[in-house]
Image: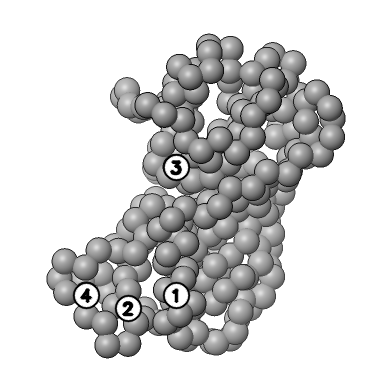
Amino acid sequence: MPLPPVIFEDDALLVLDKPAGLPVVAEPGARGGETLLAQVREARGEAVTNAHRPDAESSGLVVFAKTKPALDFTSGQFQAKTAAAVWHALAVVQADGPESAHWPREAGCVPATFAMDWWIGRDAERPGVMRAFRRNGGQPAHTDFAGEEDFGAVVLLTCRPQTGRRHQVRVHLAAAGLPVLNDPVYGDAAWTLRLSDFKRGYKGGHDEKPMVRQLALHAGELTLRHPVTKESLTLTAPLPAELTIALRNLVKFARPQRRSRSSS
């Protein structure tokens, strides 16, 4: 199987634009299945190892190291939180979200910048799932958010996690009443984004397919120091095609007012 698009490669690093749904390594409890690491090792050799592990459901930048010194130096930046990541999320606006006050907004306005600093820990009732705590539950976590586009029912956000907790962006957005679109764990799996929701006069019919089927969370930018040159390296990956097309239609047809829809 061919590798996903190569964003950067030299003798020390390999950076790929991972598609949504492909785990970097085998997830806990998973039985078999393809992994990105297996694909990379088949193409580049067994010495190559991932320097971090983004969510399987998300898309975007993943960094692999080709040597042990490169792995130690690069993974250390992720552990020390000196590698700066920028994520893009299409989030669903929940008017009655549990912590919507975190997100000051008026209908028709591009959302304000805001931050979530709730701690993140494991959900005792759901194995493998994380949850947000106001304080003293799990570990401290902080994410900065900025609104890019406001489409009423959904918003495009830039997300900058300052810590590296499991599912951090997804958990913080859900706690803010803005779950990532198509998040089956922390959002409403029945809520879909369809062209007929906002294009006036468009009738999709009973077989209309959602505009976005993947988890609408993409690692679009990453800045870190190169393990050999020690110079700053900024890498970017474009939005996946279906997100790009959906945003193009939202910009053209959506009206900036808060809406809700049933799952029917």
Badge 3 density bin: few <14, some 14–19, many ≥20, Cα 10 Å? some
Q: Is residue 155 visible?
A: yes
3 vs 2, front mark: 3
4 vs 2, front mark: 4
Residue 133, horizontal then vertical, whole percent: 58, 53
User: Is tag 1's residue or tag 3's residue first in the polypeptide sequence?
Assistant: 3
Quarter of the image that includes the N terminus? top left
Q: Amino acid at mark 1?
A: Leu
Residue annotated with mark 3: 19
Q: Amino acid at mark 2?
A: Asp
Please, what secondary structure does the residue beneath circle 1 have?
Answer: helix
Residue annotated with mark 2: 197
User: Is tag 3's residue or tag 2's residue first in the polypeptide sequence?
Assistant: 3
Please, what secondary structure does the residue beneath circle 3 have?
Answer: loop
Residue 32, horizontal then vertical, whole percent: 32, 23
Residue annotated with mark 4: 204
Badge 4 density bin: few <14, some 14–19, many ≥20, Cα 10 Å? few
Mark 1 touching mark 3, by CB under 8 A? no
Q: Amino acid at mark 4?
A: Gly
Mark 4 touching mark 1, by CB under 8 A? no
Between the residue at mark 4 and the residue at mark 1, the CA separation in whole angstroms equals 16 Å
Q: Amino acid at mark 3?
A: Pro
Picture quadrant of residue 60: top right
Mark 3 touching mark 2, by CB under 8 A? no
Please, what secondary structure does the residue beneath circle 4 have?
Answer: loop
Badge 1 density bin: few <14, some 14–19, many ≥20, Cα 10 Å? many
Badge 2 density bin: few <14, some 14–19, many ≥20, Cα 10 Å? some
Residue annotated with mark 1: 250
